[in-house]
Amino acid sequence: MLEFSSMAQDFVEATSSLVGGRTINIMDREGTIIASTEQERIGTFHQGSAEVIATGKPVLIETKDLPRYPGAKEGYNMPIFLKDELIGVVGIFGCEEQMLNVANLLKVYVTQHFAQQAMAQKQNVESEVRNRLLSLLLLGDIGQMETIYQLSALIPVQLAFPVKVIMIRAGKRKNTREQMNHYTQLFQNMMWQGTLDRSRDVFGIQNNDCIIIHSAPRHGKADEDLDKIIAQVVREEGLCIAVSGACPRLEDIPGGMKESNTLISMEGGPVRNLEDSQVKIQYLIYKSLIHGGTKYAEMLYRKLTASQDARQAEVLLVTARVYYQENGSVQKASERLHLHKNTLLYSCLLYTSPSP
C-alpha cells in the first residue's frame, strides 16, 4: 500500500477551501483517520471508512445512521484506488442532496493527486539511482561491478559499448537551483524527443554539469541521436557541449570523462567533439601546453631561430600553421601554400624534429 499519510494533511487543508470549508477526512486501510481539517480527530477510528475498506464501495452516513458509526459524522466516504489497489478512504461532511456530486469530484481529485505524488516519488528514486550509477561508472572501479549491475537492473539500463562521455555546461552559471532546474528540463526534453535512451544511456548531474554516458548506436548505424543531442544543446542559449572519444570498456569511462572535462575547459565554440579532427589537434596542443608543453615549444622556437634567418623562420611558422589549419592534410596545405608536397613535408620535419 502506498504510504501517503505525510502528504495527506497538506492535501485536506488545501482542498477544504474548494468545498466551502467543509470537513474532509482521509483514512488509511485500517480505518484510522490520518489527515483531517479537524485535527483533533487524527488518529481516531472511523467506522464508516472501515466499511468502505471491506466492500470497496462508497458509504453514505446520514444523521439517523450515526449510532451505527462511532467516530463518524454524516457525509460521504469514497474509496481511493491507485492502479486498482484500494489505498484509503476520503470522506466529506454534508447531507446526501448537497454532497453526492462534490464527493465524486473529491474522489477523482484525491486519486489524481496521490497518483501524481507516487509518480514524482518514483522519478525521484530513479534519479537518485541514476546519479549513483553514474558516479560509479565515472570512477571506473571494476571492484564495484556487483553494485553497478544491481543499480543497472533497478532502473533498468544496459550500456552498449563503446560509449562516449558527454558533458554539458552553462557558460554563465545561474544560481544553483535555477541551473539544476534548467538541466532537469533539458534531460526531460531529450527523453521526450527520443534522443536520450533511458534503457541504454546513463545520465545525471555531477558537480553542476550535465553528464551523459552515451551508448553506441544500434546496428552500427550513424549516431543520429548524438547529432540530435548536440543540435538541441546548441539551440539552448549559453550552453556548450563536449564529446569524448570512444570508450570501449567500462574502465575507459574515467578517461572519457577527463577528455570531456578538458575539452569543455578549452576556448572555442559551443561544440567540442573529439571526433572532429580540428578539435583533436586543438585538444592535443592544449594538453601539451598544460603538461609542460610550453618549454618544448620554446625549445623548438629557439632551434628554429638559431638555424634560420628571420625571414625563413617566418615562412616555416606560416607553413606549420596552415598545415595544422588543414587538419594535417598535406595535399590541402600544399595547395594553399602553392608548394610541392615534398617541400611541405620537409619544412614540417625541419621545424618539429628534436635536437640531436
Image: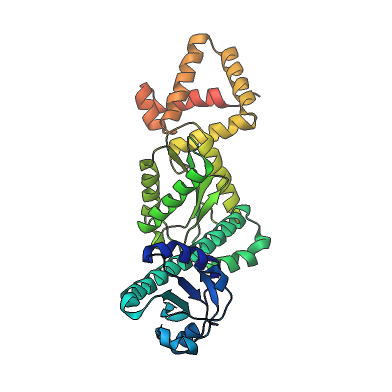
Residue 180 visible in the current orientation: yes
**How many discs mark residues in the rendered view?**
0
Q: Nearer the viewer, residue 104 or 254?
A: 104
Q: Is residue 140 left or right of residue 211?
A: right
Q: Position of residue 145 (x, y in %)?
A: 63, 64
Vertical position of residue 74 compared to residue 304: above or below: below
Q: Residue at x 38, y 53 (%)?
A: 189
Residue 4 visible in the current orientation: no
Q: Residue at x 56, y 81 (%)?
A: 45
Q: Nearer the viewer, residue 306 or 29?
A: 29
Vertical position of residue 178 compared to residue 350: above or below: below
Q: Is residue 331 left or right of residue 157?
A: left
| The C terminus, quarter of image | top right
Q: Quadrant of residue 337?
A: top left
Q: Position of residue 63 (x, y in %)?
A: 42, 84
Q: How is the image coloured?
A: rainbow
Q: Is residue 291 left or right of residue 166?
A: right
Q: Residue at x 63, y 65 (%)?
A: 147
Residue located farthest toward the right when viewing the structure as drawn: 143
Q: Is residue 12 left or right of residue 236?
A: right
Q: Position of residue 288 (x, y in %)?
A: 59, 32
Q: Nearer the viewer, residue 336 or 261?
A: 261
Q: Nearer the viewer, residue 224 or 52?
A: 52
Q: Residue at x 42, y 68 (%)?
A: 22
